[in-house]
Amino acid sequence: TGKELFKFKTPSGIIGNAMTYMHDGKQYVAVLSGVGGWAGIGLAAGLTNPTDGLGAVGGYSGLSEYTNLGGSLTVFSLP
């Protein structure tokens, strides 16, 4: 029906597709979050010069104040 059944705030932005799997007859849904792609270049490499990473460091220098830098795999079990 499209009705929202569940809402959850992940530790950071979603950087991977949601996946589902079954284990011992129970179904799970998992999603990867973290800082990836262009935004994560300077943060992951520890760059501090704003010109490093072709400007990525300057553009995203404050990102660590708003999100976790490490990746997190969040897994939910279905009823």
Image (cartoon, rainbow, N blue to C red):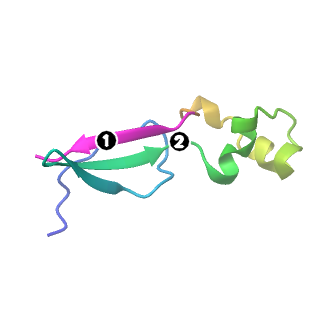
Residue 33 position in % (x across, y down): 47, 44
Q: Extreme front residue here?
A: 24
CB under 8 Å between callouts 1 and 2? no
Q: Residue at x 27, y 53 (%)?
A: 21
Instruction: State the residue position of label 1.
Output: 75
The local crowd at label 2, few if under 14, some if 14 to 19, many if 20 or more residues have their Cα within 10 Å, is: many
| Res. 62 image quadrant | top right
Could you tell me the amino acid type at mark 1?
A: Val
Q: On the rendered structure, is 14 left or right of 31?
A: right
- What range is drawn magenta here? 70-79
Which residue appears farthest toward the bottom when viewing the image?
Answer: 1
The kind of secondary structure element at disc 2 is: loop
Drawn side of residue 41 relative to residue 14, left or right: right
Query: Is tag 1's residue or tag 2's residue first in the polypeptide sequence?
Result: 2
Q: At which x and y percent is residue 48?
A: 82, 32
Is 78 situated left or right of 34 in this image? left
Quarter of the image that includes the N terminus: bottom left
Relative image position of residue 66 (x, y in whole percent): 56, 34
Q: Is residue 9 visible?
A: no
Q: Is residue 12 magenta?
A: no
Q: Residue at point 69% right, 37% down?
A: 44
Q: Residue at position x 43%, y 58% from top? A: 17
Is residue 5 depicted above or below 68 in this figure?
Answer: below
Q: Secondary structure at mark 1?
A: strand
Residue at mark 1 to residue at mark 2: CA–CA distance: 14 Å
Left or right of residue 48: residue 5: left
**Looking at the image, is mark 1 or mark 2 nearer the viewer?**
1
